[in-house]
Image: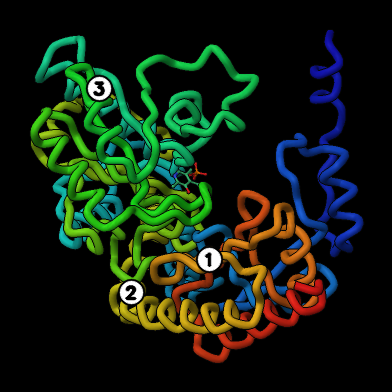
Amino acid sequence: IGVGEMKSMSAAKVEVASVKTTDEIIAMTGDFVMNTYGRLPLSLVRGEGTRVWDAEGREYLDFVSGIAVNGLGHCHPAVVEAIRRQAGTLIHCSNLYYIESQARLAKILVENSALDRVFFCNSGAEANEAAIKLARKWGKQNYGGERYVVITARQSFHGRTLATLTATAQEKYQEGFEPLPIGFRYVPFNDLEAMDRAMTSDVCAVLLEPVQGEGGVNLCDSGYLKGVRRLCDQRGALLILDEIQTGLGRTGKLFAHQHFGVEPDILTIAKSLGGGVPIGAMLAREKVASAFTPGSHASTFGGNPLATAAALAAMEALLGEGLVEHAARMGALLMEELRGLQDRHAVIRQVRGLGLMVGVELGKEGLGGEVVAACQRKGVLVNSVHGNVIRLLPPLIVEEHEIKRVVAVFGETLSELGM
Ligand code: PLP
């Protein structure tokens, strides 16, 4: 018999939970976890509101929010209570049966958007994968087999499955995984003429982020999304908006596209939807959603009782506590404070963003990592993308004094680095 089988036949090794130090956690990760993440030397073990604590009990103000997941902050009491209650009632059952919390969550999402139906899955990539499949099926049904191309923008990010990685128009994510699936076409972001030229009769959809997150916090120019919407309508293509990072209040409106006066045919969300629990969703207008019929698409865990009970509590908290409006106010303050900092630090090339999704572009390549590490030593967590853009994604519950503290720490850090 093989080694694997012998291993499974020997007595199961179950470690009794013991408190580990950061160094021990790092060593154990290095020994057993596949090496796919460039991690910081920090292990978070507890969170409450805007704050988190590491394995040694050090406290941090969290302006990363699990990359836009912890919109309600850590361990929002209503989400914790919903998870506790559901965990003791029914954690999982199949989509062979009807699930009340799934139906109720779909109802809230539909009632608060311009879309009509929801498909639930478990992550952002899966939501985009579902959107691409739906667009192709819709294209096939309405125009025959030749309309399957999805146009995406340079510097976009749509996920890591093979299709969403191909939709992600950044070579660094694709390298080594070729051959990539066919049916994707790339255009420069914010270039309406390029979009016009690319939108030939083989295009079933355009997939865009209203604000590119991983690409460096790049906003759609005013008029761009409206122009793309017009082109889609003229050519008979769908507009898919990926609001996985921008969605659910992050930009100061429930959905970022509401800033731009357009409505998508398909909308994808994930990240903060479950208040920290993995869940994704793909929403579509009725005329598009109807291209899916029983058997078209599925997910074992998609919309299961635990995830949808958590998401339902998270949505109710988001809407019931006025957090979207709060995010708009706090976002304006954060931008104002950072622009003040820009006057004193020449290294800040640009401050850009929408609501509580903010990027600070530094005029020195590679400085991002140093700034992130220095802020962490001062008890503030921020993130950097593209080596020189500091990305700030605080929880939507963030307060004025916390914004002021983070901006002060950021300024101090730049001064210490001689910038
Ligand atoms: N789309 C956007 C805009 C994202 O920011 C992300 C993740 O960062 C994804 C898709 C992929 O989401 P997930 O990591 O949940 O698959």
Binning the other alpha carbons within 10 Å of mark 3 as few (below 14), some (14 to 19) or many (20 upward) gives: many
Is the CB–ligand 1 distance for label 1 below 8 Å?
A: no
Residue matched to label 3: 136
Question: Percent x, y for residue 24?
Answer: 90, 55
Q: Who's the residue at 48% across and 56% down the image?
A: 217
Kindly identify the amino acid type of the residue bearing the numbered disc 2: Val
Badge 2 crowding class, 10 Å Cα cut-off, few under 14, some 14 to 19, many 20 or more, is many
Q: What secondary structure is marked by label 3?
A: helix
Disc 1 to disc 3: CB gap under 8 Å: no
The amino acid marked with disc number 1 is Gln
Rendering quarter of residue 416: bottom right
- In this orientation, does residue 281 appear? no
Which residue is depicted at the point 10% across and 40% down? 286
Q: Give residue 324's mark.
A: 2
Residue 350's disc number: 1
Q: Are marks 2 and 3 in contact (CB under 8 Å)?
A: no
Relative to 71, say whether 58 is above or below: below
Give the percent coordinates (x, y) of residue 353. Answer: 44, 65
Which color mode does the image show? rainbow
Disc 2 element: helix
| Sequence-first tag of 2 and 3 | 3
Q: Earlier in the sequence, mark 1 or mark 3?
A: 3
Is 230 placed left or right of 219 in the picture?
A: left
**Residue 312, image x and y in percent?**
33, 62
Inter-mark Cα distance, 2 to 3: 33 Å
Quote the CA–CA distance across marks 1 and 3: 39 Å
Q: Amino acid at mark 3?
A: Arg
Residue at x 71%, y 43% (from the top left corner): 37
Q: How many marks?
A: 3
**Disc 2 and disc 1: Cα gap in Å?**
25 Å
Relative vertical location of residue 385 with respect to residue 294 in this rendering, above or below: below
Q: Which class describes the residues within 10 Å of circle 1: few (<14), some (14-19), or many (20+)?
A: some
